[in-house]
Amino acid sequence: MNKWKKKQPATIKPFKRQTLAGDGFGGRAGFFLSRALTNIRQNVFVNVVTIGTITLALLIVSLFLLIFVNLESAAESWSERVQVTVYFDKELTSQDQSGFSGKISALSGVSRVSYVTREEALKRFKSRLRGQETLLEGVRPEVLPTSFEIALKRSHRDTASVENFVAALKLIPGITEVQYGEEWVRRFNSLLNFMRLLGTLLGGFLVIAVIFIVSNTIKLTIYSRRDELEVMALVGATRFFIKAPFLLEGLIQGMAGSVFSVVLLFGLYEGFLHNAGSFLTFNPATSGLSFLPPEYIAGLLLAGALLGFIGSLTSLKRFINV
């Protein structure tokens, strides 16, 4: 037997890819999430900087929203003063009151109609001259006109709608005079439109600035691990496999930043309510100043998550071709 028998080449077994906990959606998601949390623990400083930047950026936006919401609430309160008054040169009977009230209520945009007698008009006049009631000595209720005070719905308080409503009122027979403070309504609506336009422009600018800041901050996180990304790409990892943990990491960073921003905003709000009385001439706690509505808070939380996700997605494009 030839001891120098030729050796047979070793059989190479095909490589079998290991599955990720069943390789289903839950297994992959769990792996990517654990990988994202590991990345956060391994790069604490960079992640703290990123979350802090998102928190500060969203805090600025949320402060602007808080101011804007309360200005809108104040404007809504002021707009309730938009009132049309119809005067009559005689006292109306109960039948006349019902007739005119029905005709006025039938017009589009009417919220409330109330009849003011001559006695009630004199009482209001005296209350406005409190401390100088002697000026009205001898004045009889008969010298004052009776009137209907008409409050309009919110959607009919703009200048054009009020003018159309007044024109329709004047077509009702028997109405002597109609007043609604034309100049005041026009100036108020101009101010309201200016506030909304300014709020929209400032809000849009803040959103663009926040996206830019967050995207560049997250880019630092990705840049600090560029070698890891290159190695993973070289060993054959798919783009999705490389991206998924970083996208989840950005999502977690964004959600954490949005939660911290809402908590800080609430702390500032409470601190302002309890301390503003010492340097303001009014008490903000009793002036109707309110915190952000639940839908705005939910929007901020969602915006934070989206900012983190989009920031990671745009930053990854520098290292991984889409």
Image: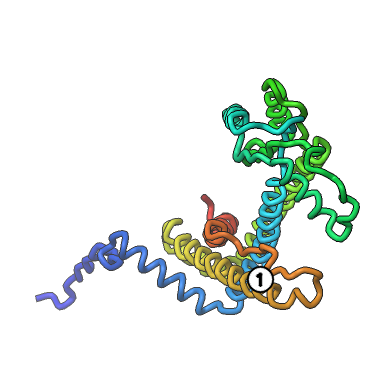
Left or right of 26? Residue 245 is: right
Given residues 198 and 87, the one toward you in this image is: 87
Q: Is mark 1 on a helix, strand or loop?
A: helix
* Residue at the (69%, 77%) spot, across then down: 274
Image-based side of 246 in relation to 265, left or right:
left
> Can you tell which quarter of the image residue 284 is in?
bottom right
Please name whichever residue, 236 or 33, is drawn nearer the observer in this view of the structure.
Answer: 33
Residue 49 in the image: above or below residue 165 = below
Residue at the farthest front position: 138
Q: Where is the N terminus found, in terms of image quarters?
A: bottom left
Disc 1 target residue: 269
Identity of the amino acid at label 1?
Tyr
* Residue 227 showing in the rendered view: no
Is disc 1 surrounded by few (<14), some (14 to 19) or many (20+) residues within 10 Å? some
Please state the total of marks drawn on the protein image: 1
Residue shown at the point (74%, 33%) measured from the top left: 87
- Residue 16 locus on image (x, y percent): 26, 64
